Image (cartoon, rainbow, N blue to C red):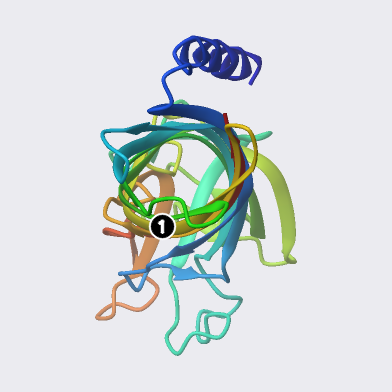
Amino acid sequence: MKKLLLGIFALSTVFAANAQDKKFQIGLVLGPTFNATKIQTTKIERNGIGTGFTIGIGGNYMFNQNIGLASGIQFDLESFKLNYGSDDNSTALGSSAALGDVFYAYTDTDIKKYEDGAVEDFADTTAFQLMTRKFRSKYITIPIFLKFQTNMIGSFIYYGKFGLRTSVLAGVRMDDTGFDADYDAADANNQFSRNATATSREQTNMKPESVKKGLSHIRTGIGIYGGAEWNFTGSTFLYGEFGFNYGITPVLYQQSSHLVDRVEDQANPGTYTYSNLDVKNNPQHVFELKIGLLF
């Protein structure tokens, strides 16, 4: 976090040195974000709308009076929830269809990697049956937009922007709700099973040990924005804008490195197979409301 803030400060200093040419503007930006994961699998379901907050620097470089390039660098704090199971797997928390049985093995707050049908480097039996997961993520976002603006109308300029909003994952923690379970590496049919006396509970600040952290490292959306700039003094503008970003890349890893999907053999009830949870392609749409200053 400190390195990121120092980087933003250094970048703004370099940009400010060129700000005498009013083709170029730079300033601070902040505001709330809202995200909606588009679920395209029966393995999971969205639990409400996620929220977030962004802060950073933004700038414009105008090719002429009406067309330019808008970019910057932002630091995003976001959260959203997904359902992975239900208490009885017959009604999935409001869903019309049941979700599956999803497990993971863990030590303290570290979630162990599951690969080739077994938990990697794990001699314990501690496991968890996952019902709901809240992702708490940090992103570094670089928007690159074409900007189309009007001439000055009174003290205001009105504009629209179109382009790409790309975010790089900087960190993630997970708050999970579910049930205590057992892991038995020697039992191929009952590798994972919920404790008979388990009651629903939450465990917080969980993190996978593998390189794959549950969320994709890169998230990209096609964005369209509209806003207005108010020239309230000298060459300083106060602006506000609202935008929608249509997700085109998955927000989750399509095949999890740590979540285990238990599937019952319909021809042989009580017999199970285990594999890494595959949730297919689930992009995330982001709504963004920002206010800022341009100098």
> Closer to the camera, 221 or 148?
148
Q: Position of residue 80 (x, y in %)?
A: 57, 57
Q: Residues within 10 Å of mark 1 (few under 14, many from 20)?
A: some
The residue wearing badge 1 is 225
Residue at image position (52%, 34%) is 74
Say above or below: 291 vs 6. below
Residue at image position (58%, 61%) is 50
Q: Quadrant of residue 210?
A: top left
Visible in this render: residue 165? yes
Quarter of the image with the N terminus is top right
Visible in this render: residue 125? no
Q: Position of residue 198 (x, y in %)?
A: 72, 64
Tell me the amino acid under the disc marked 1: Tyr
- Residue at the extreme bottom: 96
Left or right: where 285 falls relative to 103? left
The number of discs equals 1
Residue at image position (50%, 86%) is 90
> Closer to the camera, 40 or 266?
40
